[in-house]
Amino acid sequence: MGSIRGRLHEYSARRAGRKDGRRGIPAGDADTHPFELLAIKQRGDEALWTVAKAWKEADAAPMGREHALDDEVGRAEAALAERRERFAVSERERTEEERRDKEHLRTLEPHASRRSTGT
């Protein structure tokens, strides 16, 4: 014979098992599981897959942003190169125009000096 405590535990387990049986909860060694437990498991699986999908998308998102930023940097560099070239052309034109103006002023200087002497 077991101790009183052991018998009390065994009685409580049997009683809990009968209650579970009346509620439709199968025994632990049963081959089938109640619908409610399967539904809970299914919701858990869906939540797990949702989290896994979100992680996968989050991991992929930085690569997409990186490519977009690389494209934007490329366009900005191309625009900068174009503006630098236009600036260089403008500087050459301005320098050539200043040279022509100085040349023109030199041709006018002898005439200007004659007028200032009081002819």
Image: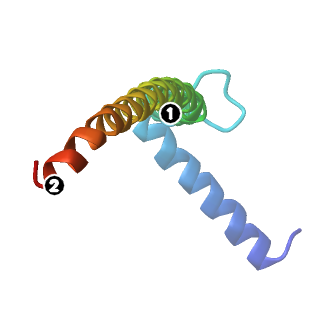
**Image coordinates for residue 30, horizontal then vertical, percent:** 67, 28
Callout 2 amino acid: Ser
- Work out whether residue 23 or residue 5 is closer to the camera in this orientation and state it: 23
Instruction: Point out the residue furthest to the right here.
Output: 1
| Distance between mark 2 and mark 1 Cα atoms | 87 Å
Q: State the image quarter where residue 55 is shown.
A: top right
Dot in front, 2 or 1: 2
* Mark 1 nearby-residue class (10 Å; few <14, some 14–19, many ≥20): few
User: Circle 2 — which element?
Assistant: helix
Count of residue discs = 2
Q: Amino acid at mark 1?
A: Ala
**Circle 2 is placed at which residue position?**
116
Q: Is residue 18 above or below residue 101?
A: below
The relative height of residue 110 versus residue 87 in the rendered view (above or below) is: below
Q: Name the residue located 31 percent from the left edge and 34 percent from the top edge.
A: 101
Q: In screen coordinates, is 30 left or right of 73?
A: right
